[in-house]
Image (cartoon, rainbow, N blue to C red):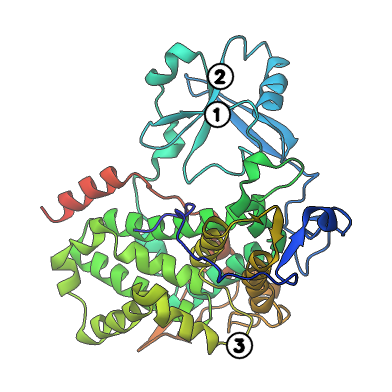
Amino acid sequence: MLLVTKAPPWPCMLSSVSSGSYFLSLSQARNMTAWLPSQDEPLPSSNCAIRVGDKVSYDICRPDHSVLTLQLPVTASVREVMAALAKEDSWTKGQVLVKVNSAGDAIGLQPEARGVATSLGLNERLFVVNPQEVHELTPHPEQLGPTVGSAEGLDLVSAKDLAGQLTDHDWNLFNSIHQVELIHYVLGPQHLRDVTTANLERFMRRFNELQYWVATELCLCAVPGPRAQLLRKFIKLAAHLKEQKNLNSFFAVMFGLSNSAISRLARTWERLPHKVRKLYSALERLLDPSWNHRVYRLALTKLSPPIIPFMPLLLKDMTFIHEGNHTLVENLINFEKMRMMARAVRMLHHCRSHSNVPLSPLRSRVSHLHEDSQAVRISTCSEQSLSTRSPASTWAYVQQLKVIDNQRELSRLSRELEP
């Protein structure tokens, strides 16, 4: 399983170059306009974008799981969060701010850390607690995920319709990312003032959410027959996401299907028709990591925008460029490194260069998201299925997915299904 995290450094050294066109002196750089653009610059169709000056919700839990919600700047530091809490009934006297995941692991946050609300991982929550009580913290009940699956509701939506709804939602998130966020993320946003990578972090969290959603729904489907049908739907969902050029969610769904808690369900996989298993094998080829994901990279070059690319790989490329090449060489700025970073960032612009063209083939959905429409027959990979769930309810569902992200819990559920 792939979780979106920063990749370790990988040597990507440049050849020896002494030309002035590749290196820029520090004095020259100081006299030039900043090479990082402002995040206040407008983005096309980015009405859901989080800007540097925006305020966001900070949900702060106490050890007893009571919650206080504050509206603070997205770039607020931990020290500023604690100062705001101190005004609310003296919450923070001698206390510290920590983040706790669904497994109960707690990590203390440094006072200088910024943007902690938007950088939380999947199912992570902020807690304020006395230092000696950190080891006694337990996750908030909402962090544990659902106990009942959504298989019955998913059965009412065709795989193609579901893929379209996911793609529409993902496109809104993807289109809200400012290109400079990629650079800030690689450099380390916690060390930069007055910048935010909130939109990028939200998009990456969505990737993790989707892969755990697939594993969660399958592990919560107790009956073998419906579970095999659900597995079949997820495979077809991946195929439709690929067709709609939503490669980020395609990878997320495929990684969810390859989760150890799902791949071990041998009796469930055996129930799949031969044609569906053959389709899954074909889709798996795009995930081949050999030769630096050569299969995926070749496939990407053959696609025309709009495209939602596999974001973790793009960020890994940028991390390798940054960590594998010196920024300064003999007190000169390595301008070739900046060019390499710029080429990677331009991929984002290329993928969004025709954003006015809807990715989803369901052209009329966006204008009818909040209207109930009559059931229509929609083609899936190999069959016709009847979609009886309204677009509005499906849209609400895909925006608020509830997942179990504790791998130990998923493995336990899997063993209960097939010992």
Horizontal side of 388 relative to 303 (left or right) equals left
Q: Earlier in the sequence, mark 2 or mark 3?
A: 2
**Along the line of sight, which residue is nearer the eye, 100 or 228?**
100
Residue lying farthest to the left in this orientation: 419
Q: In the displayed structure, would residue 148 be above or below residue 253?
A: above
Type of the residue with mark 3: Ser
Give the residue displayed 48% in from the left and 54% down from the top. 401
Distance CA(mark 2)–CA(mark 1): 8 Å
Find disc 3 in the rendering and name its residue: 304
Q: In the displayed structure, would residue 131 be above or below residue 274?
A: above
Type of the residue with mark 1: Leu
Q: Residues within 10 Å of mark 2 (few under 14, many from 20)?
A: many
Q: Residues within 10 Å of mark 3 (few under 14, many from 20)?
A: few
Residue 390 shows up from this direction: no
- The quadrant of the rendering that contains the N terminus is bottom left
**Element under disc 3:** loop
The label number, if any, that marks residue 109 in the structure image: 1
Q: Earlier in the sequence, mark 2 or mark 1?
A: 2
Q: Position of residue 371 (x, y in %)?
A: 65, 69
Distance CA(mark 2)–CA(mark 3): 49 Å
Q: Are marks 2 and 1 in contact (CB under 8 Å)?
A: yes
Give the residue displayed 40% in from the left and 67% down from the top. 253
Find disc 2 in the rendering and name its residue: 96
